[in-house]
Image: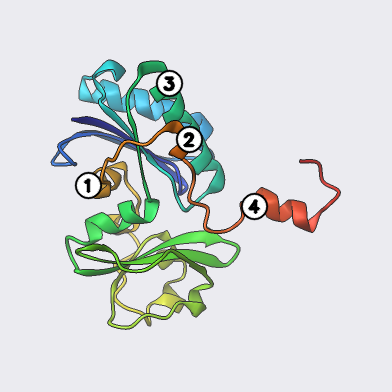
Amino acid sequence: MLILALDASTPVTTVALARDSGREVLAEISVTASGASETLLPAVHAALHLAGEDLGSVERVLAGVGPGTFTGIRIVAATARALSSGTGIPLSKNSTLDALAAPALAFSRDVLAVLDARRGQVFARRYSEAGPATDIYCLRPEELSVEGGPFVVGDGAVRYRGELSRLGRIPPDGSPLHSVTAVGHVISADLTPVSPEELVPIYVREPDAEVRRVLNPWSRP
């Protein structure tokens, strides 16, 4: 199966083409930019070109649905739906935290995946070889409490190293284990087909726009 995986839940827009649950990666593009709306489709085209494939060869579109940057998650979901609608390619979805944890599980059987959630908070979830071991948490870094000394990865672990180093071992800031990759989605997703209506973001908390509306009730929707 040729899989096109997309994620923009973090400041990095990442796209990959892979076969057989990630065992054969044909192309991977990662772009750090101000917005996924300008980078996602060009990254898709670049990955297809690099792999020597076209969209007609893709057998599954796999979308990262968060948690993470609300705008990026929505852009990925909308793009995945549009690609599926125009071609008939089935859709699948996967948590961004699952994709982050997957490569780290090759180095440790106990992983705490942590994404910077802004507003002084992090999204976090613990993983074992069997998969997710907890729900997804949205907490201030100092509120996270775990036992057993997990391997802690993610941009949240980098930003809040001082607060989170008490929990377990954190790789150096430049480690690729801190980055969400589209390949991470491919190797961690179960690839169950979903309808376009089921391809919805994992927000965990209210989107920033909703919070601003509460703080400023006179703002227009």
Of the image marks 1 and 4, the number of the one nearer the N terminus: 1
| Image mark for residue 19 | none
Query: Residue 116: x, y in percent?
Result: 48, 60
Question: Which residue is the site of mark 2?
Answer: 197
Of the image marks 4 and 2, the number of the one nearer the N terminus: 2
Query: Residue 168: x, y in percent?
Result: 31, 78
Q: Amino acid at mark 3?
A: Ser
Instruction: Identify the residue at image location x=76%, y=41%.
Output: 221
Query: Residue 50: x, y in percent?
Result: 25, 25
Q: Dot 1: what SS?
A: helix
Of the image marks 1 and 3, the number of the one nearer the N terminus: 3
| Cα separation between marks 4 and 2 | 22 Å
Question: Which residue is the site of mark 4?
Answer: 208
Nearest the eye: 162 or 19: 19
Question: Which residue is the site of mark 1?
Answer: 187
Of the image marks 3 and 4, the number of the one nearer the N terminus: 3
Q: Quadrant of residue 129?
A: bottom left
Left or right of 186? Residue 210 is right
**Residues marked 3 and 4 touching at CB (< 8 Å):** no
| Image mark for residue 85 | 3
Instruction: Identify the residue at image location x=41%, y=17%.
Output: 86
The residue mark sitting in front, 4 or 2, is 2
Left or right of 187? Residue 132 is right
Q: Dot 3: what SS?
A: helix
Residue count near mark 1 (Cα–Cα under 10 Å), binned few <14, some 14–19, many ≥20: some
Instruction: Identify the residue at image location x=34%, y=58%.
Output: 178
| Cα separation between marks 3 and 4 | 29 Å
Q: Dot 4: what SS?
A: helix
Q: Quadrant of residue 102?
A: bottom left
Of the image marks 2 and 1, the number of the one nearer the N terminus: 1
